[in-house]
Image (cartoon, rainbow, N blue to C red):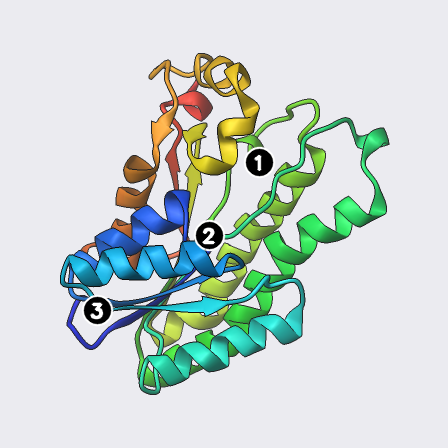
Amino acid sequence: MTSKTSTALITGGTSGIGRATANKLAQLGIHVLVVGRNAERGKKTVDEIRAAGGKADFISSDLHDAASARGVAKRAIELGEGHVDILINNAGVYPFGPTHEMTEEQFDRVFSLNVKAPYFLVAALAPLMAQRGKGAIVNLSTMVADYGVPGMSLYASSKAAIELLTKTWTAEYGPSGVRVNTVSPGPTRTEGTEAMGEGLAQLAAQGPAGRPATADEIAEAVVFLATDRASFVYGAKLAVDGGRTAI
């Protein structure tokens, strides 16, 4: 799965953990397809990968419903010359606030991107992987899906759903050679978490590592699970959270 003909589809692939993962997979000779809403960031990501000798393409989508997920899958299959070998469900939104302040619009937005889009991407791509007898799917979760944190009801519950889906998809597609696993990051410094300010460092200080992760550190774990280095890893959750959920 690390040959030059392999194709990886990465949602939220134009920034943060997704972009770091795309760069690392491209360095392995994998054709990376990065999905995002911002065409300018998409072009920049692709240009940087190509300049470094890698192969990359951008797919524009906001992944807000089943139809958009199917559209991304169809385009990815075309760009991948008939196959997608790796799917990284990385895109996500995480509005914070007390449950009683969350609106239905916020609820729908979180679950549409964090749960519905991965669900229908897997529905479109996993059966094709199963037909070929190989494939890898990596879902991104969060450490706060493991314990209660005030103000994170929407985000954490959407990721808890993804963790259960990892197990279900392993049961459904694992016997056909499709490995489905989860990476569960702790606080990570990315463009998306800049708005948290000192809150990010305070959250990270609760773990043994005592600091936030870099996007590259999380991406290393994603790449491990996405490639043949993890050939006997099925249905696992890899916590990359500086030890927070261990204590």
Identify the mark nearer the N-term, 2 or 3.
3
Residue at which label 2 appears: 90
CA separation in Å, label 1 and label 3 = 30 Å
Q: Nearer the viewer, residue 11 or 47?
A: 47
Question: In this rendering, is residue 216 above or below 114?
Answer: above
Would you name the residue on which mark 1 appears?
145
Name the one closer to the observer, 55 or 126.
55
Instruction: State the CA–CA distance, disc 1 to disc 2.
Output: 15 Å
Secondary element type, mark 3: loop
Position of residue 163 measured from the top left corner of the image (x, y, whole percent): 53, 49
Could you tell whether 192 is left or right of 179 in the image?
Answer: right
Q: Which residue is mark 3?
A: 1
Front in this rendered view, residue 180 or 105? 105
Numbered tag placed on residue 29 in the rendering? none
The location of residue 65, given as percent across then percent down, is 67, 67
Residue at 34% of width from left, 55% of height from top?
44
Residue 135, image quadrant: bottom left
Dot 3: few (<14), some (14–19), or many (≥20) neighbours within 10 Å? Answer: many
